Image (cartoon, rainbow, N blue to C red):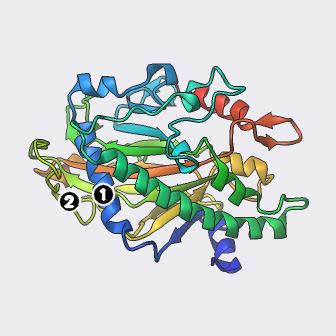
């Protein structure tokens, strides 16, 4: 149960726009560390294997993606790698994509997932699916509380709308993120596969440019910082534990949110909690009562990393309406139409 006052503080007009949920199932901390460790193993696979679990036809929004997302005009993001999964399995364990009925040309959601084989990443699919299911279950509880808040503030709000969307969605998308460790390069040097950090001239959003999510509610784990100085050996199962750090070596690095009032705040998510923030589709659906939350990720300086090679891993789960669901009743806009516009802007 989320108190009404807490919702006002998290999502109201003067809020930061983020809600932390604690007291999660006891398996969560270990499952989080397991899945986020897999992100480093995944990102360090040979290029030919990464190509085999990519989906160009889906504009790299299924499977592995690196350097395909345009967050700034003329610049493709090479500072992080992503592994995308369609979470239709939440409805039926046999489903790996949203149904194509009525949407034959939308592979970003209807293309099946491409998992690495058990021989390459043993246990990855099962652990990933289990963690995403836990996050979606928790999102449904947050959605129920949001529905109470929306019903009190929005005329003609459909009772239980957001909880229904979360529980019945075939389009919920998970994104496992690996932010490459920064490497110092000359100011006039080329970009490295890792994050290029120029001493003394680092952008605030150096690891991930400022953006809003385009779904309804995003569930987000805290980041896992891993020292990848040593080669990652994948010859045994279970995979060897990685050298994790309690936090980034640079205290200024991490997730930042621009609040409703325009201030910028660093968000520290405890490792045993999940954070939830609102997206653009929910802002449209609720006529602006819930605002999409602009956020960015600031990378550490190479100097702060010292001799370590510190990467950042996290998992975001974007719950969103089914493709045919209306998000703007006045304009008759479906989520498919809305999402296609977002995809076209960023690919």
Q: Is residue 278 left or right of residue 305?
A: right
- C-alpha separation, residue under disc 1 versus residue under disc 2: 7 Å
Q: Secondary structure at mark 1?
A: strand
- Quadrant hosting residue 5: bottom right
Which sits in the foreground, 32 or 67? 32
Q: Is residue 286 above or below residue 51?
A: below
Residue 4 drawn at (x, y percent): 70, 78
* Residue 213 seen: yes
Q: Marks 1 and 2: CB-CB under 8 Å?
A: yes
Residue 50 drawn at (x, y percent): 29, 28
* Residue 295 seen: no
Which sits in the foreground, 70 or 105? 105
- Residue drawn at x 15%, y 49% is 237
Tag on residue 79?
A: none
Residue 131 drawn at (x, y percent): 42, 57
- Quadrant hosting residue 137: bottom right
Q: Is residue 122 above or below residue 159?
A: above
Ranked by sequence position, the earlier of labels 1 and 2 is: 1
- Residue drawn at x 32%, y 23% is 51
In the rendered image, which quarter contains the N terminus?
A: bottom right
Which sits in the foreground, 225 or 146? 146
- Quadrant hosting residue 326: top right
Q: Secondary structure at mark 2?
A: strand
> What is the crowding at mark 1: few (fewer than 14 residues within 10 Å), some, or many (at least 20)?
many
Q: Is residue 117 left or right of residue 130?
A: left
Tag on residue 224?
A: 1
Residue 40 drawn at (x, y percent): 25, 45
Q: Which residue is mark 2?
A: 244
Q: Is residue 291 above or below residue 141?
A: above
- Residue drawn at x 58%, y 61% is 139
């Amino acid at each position: 149960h989320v108190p009404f006052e807490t919702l006002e503080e998290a999502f109201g007009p003067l809020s930061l726009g983020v809600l932390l949920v604690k007291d999660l199932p006891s398996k969560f901390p270990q499952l989080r560390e397991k899945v986020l460790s897999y992100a480093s193993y995944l990102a360090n696979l040979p290029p030919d294997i990464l190509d085999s679990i990519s989906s160009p036809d889906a504009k790299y929004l299924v499977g592995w993606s690196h350097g395909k997302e345009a967050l700034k005009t003329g610049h493709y993001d090479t500072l992080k790698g992503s592994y995308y999964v369609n979470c239709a399995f939440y409805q039926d364990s046999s489903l790996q994509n949203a149904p194509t009925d009525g949407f034959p040309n939308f592979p970003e959601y209807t293309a099946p997932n491409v998992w690495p084989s058990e021989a390459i990443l043993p246990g990855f699919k099962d652990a990933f699916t289990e963690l995403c299911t836990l996050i979606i279950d928790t999102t449904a509880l947050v959605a129920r509380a949001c529905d109470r808040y929306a019903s009190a503030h929005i005329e003609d709000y459909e009772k239980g709308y957001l909880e229904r969307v979360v529980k019945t969605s075939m389009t919920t998308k998970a994104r496992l993120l690996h932010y490459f460790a920064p490497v110092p390069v000359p100011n006039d040097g080329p970009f490295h596969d890792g994050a290029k950090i120029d001493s003394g001239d680092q952008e605030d959003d150096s690891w991930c440019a400022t953006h809003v999510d385009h779904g309804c509610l995003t569930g987000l784990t805290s980041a896992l910082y891993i020292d990848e100085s040593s080669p990652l050996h994948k010859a045994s199962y279970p995979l060897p534990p990685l050298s994790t750090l309690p936090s980034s070596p640079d205290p200024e690095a991490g997730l930042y949110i621009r609040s409703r009032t325009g201030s910028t705040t660093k968000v520290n998510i405890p490792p045993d909690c999940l954070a939830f923030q609102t997206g653009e589709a929910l802002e449209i659906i609720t006529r602006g009562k819930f605002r999409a939350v602009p956020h960015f990720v600031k990378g550490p300086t190479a100097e702060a990393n010292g001799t370590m090679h510190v990467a950042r891993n996290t998992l975001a789960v974007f719950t969103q309406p089914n493709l045919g669901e209306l998000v703007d009743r006045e304009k008759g806009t479906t989520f498919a139409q809305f999402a296609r516009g977002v995809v076209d802007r960023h690919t």
